Amino acid sequence: MSAPTEEIRTAEDRPAQASTPPTGSGDRTSLRRATRVFRPRRVLPATIVALVLAVVAALVAVEVIGGLFGSPPGLLPVDGLSALGRETRWNDALPFVVCGAGILLGLLLLFLAVKPGRPRAVVLASADPQVVMGIESAGMSRHLARAAESVPGVSSAQVAVSARRVRVVASSPLRDTAGLDEQIRTAVTERVDELAPMAGRPNVRVTVRRRQD
């Protein structure tokens, strides 16, 4: 059973020391290309739309073929729809509502197709612009957590990674944690530089909590 923790120090983002940006960092064209490669597609919405269209097309086909042979199966309310079509005028509200709903649905599907899901991988720089490399966000979080836990005085660490920020929450049994946040930031930043994310070095924010035994 883990002991309760008490937050005693939060380190805000500060510029890290130093180093030369990794090869390929800041190359926006390569970054966009790699992001497209690693970005997941909208598989679930596409599958749902395809299934709905397939079911509707099958029902219509069965109804039409049954009608041609004189025995419609009645899977669709053909008579009601026919009567509605005969009685509805173009200047009625119903056509405008149906057309508006169709337009909104089409725009939504177009938006989902043009803007796929968020990338699940952090794009890494490469000396060869034709080579695309990446690391899963969860894998990068574990990798940076090990770097934070390698700092003396840190018992455990949790890391959350986003495109522009790395958030580190570390626990320490030490009574005096002065300077520990800077050591953690340095260790994590060095590990980030080794990975060389193509978008550049993210801001590293560190929170140190004292673990009470």
Image (spheres, rainbow, N blue to C red):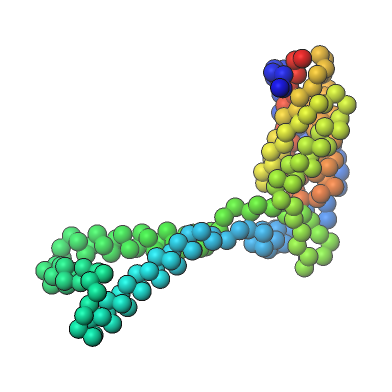
* Left or right relative to 83: residue 51: right
Residue 144, x across and y down, in percent: 78, 40
| Identity of the residue drawn at 85% across and 47% down | 194
Q: In the image, 98: left or right of 83?
A: right
Pick whichever, 194 or 32, lies toward us.
Answer: 194
Question: Which residue in the rendered view is the most extreme toward the right?
Answer: 152
Q: Is residue 198 visible?
A: no
Residue at 82 percent across and 65 percent down: it is 128
Q: In what quadrant of the picture does the N terminus appear?
A: top right
Q: Residue furthest left?
A: 87
Residue 17 place in picture, x, y as percent: 84, 37
Q: Quadrant of residue 15?
A: top right
Relative to 174, say whether 141 is above or below: below
Question: Which quadrant holds the C terminus?
Answer: top right
* Quarter occupied by residue 108: bottom left
Question: Residue 148 or 59: which is nearer the viewer?
Answer: 59
- Relative to residue 198, is residue 74 drawn left or right? left
Residue 153 appears anywhere in the view = yes
Which is more toward the observer, 104 or 4? 4
**Can you say whether 47 is above or below 123 in the image?**
below
* Residue at the (81%, 49%) spot, across then down: 195
Q: Position of residue 148 (x, y in %)?
A: 81, 33
Q: Is residue 57 left or right of residue 34?
A: left
Q: Position of residue 174 (x, y in %)?
A: 82, 17
